[in-house]
Amino acid sequence: MVDAAAQTASLLSLRVAVVATFCALPCAIWLAWVLARHDFRGKAWVSALVHLPLVLPPVVTGYVLLIAFGRNGLIGSALYELFGVTLAFRWTGAAMAAAVMAFPLMVRAIRLSIEAVDPRLEEAGATLGLGPWRVFARITFPLALPGVLVGAVMGFAKAMGEFGATITFVANIPGETQTLPSAIYALLQIPGQEGPAATLVLYALAISVLAVLVSEWLARRLAARVGGNHAL
């Protein structure tokens, strides 16, 4: 029974983390590029807003999501009335909460990677007739790709371990919103369930270690490829 529950929670955690990472990554890349390469009024405020989930208690973030995207929330009610979509107390809401919490880490890592790209290379591309988007696609993004991967892995890891915002926004419903962290928490509230909780901890540890090893392997391959192309 414990094994079945552990498998269900593990698969749900993986689904939530993957969906959260892939949904947040394009926005994180775009915003990181804007913050790294453009100066505009209010830039400090935008950066502060992006990093706000890192300093706010996760429960507060989850509560804000519940107020905004709950069935009776301003955005949530519109989504339900127009499209029949409900995020609160659904696994999709868990993915949304995880994406919000992971987003600042992704933006930070990708922004640092873009800032490390020599602007003179982008200027050279522009003098050859490349527009801003083609400069980004052909020069900036390939050179920053290892950092993009690091940001994606950091976001995935954060999404896998997210607890406070998730349990506040979507509760702890077995088979629907119960991820590994919330399943571990639920078991620890029951006397004598330390063993099953330890099993789930091992599941989470194995998934996290595997993700880190794969990311390290990919990052080295990408860095070697980018370095070789740059040398050419």
Image (tube, helix red, strand yellow):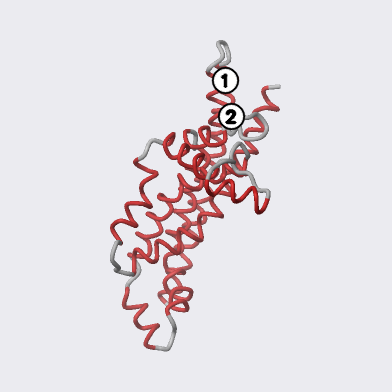
Circle 2: residue type: Asn
Q: Which residue is mark 1?
A: 187
Mark earlier in primary sequence (1, 2): 2
Which dot marks residue 172?
Answer: 2
Residue positioned 56% across, 54% down in the render: 22
Residue 184 vertical position relative to residue 107 in the rendered view, above or below: above
The x, y position of residue 159, in whole percent, is: 51, 43
Residue positioned 42% across, 36% down in the render: 60
Q: Callout 1 environment at 10 Å: few (<14), some (14 to 19), or many (20+)?
A: some
> Which secondary structure lies at badge 1?
helix
Residue positioned 45% across, 41% down in the render: 64
The x, y position of residue 155, in whole percent, is: 48, 48
Total numbered labels placed on residues in the image = 2
Circle 1: residue type: Leu
Q: Which quadrant would the C terminus be assigned to in this image?
A: bottom left
Residue positioned 51% across, 43% down in the render: 98
Query: Are dots 1 and 2 in contact, CB under 8 Å?
Result: no
Residue 69 vertical position relative to residue 110 in the rendered view, above or below: above
Judge left or right: residue 167 versus residue 91.
Answer: left
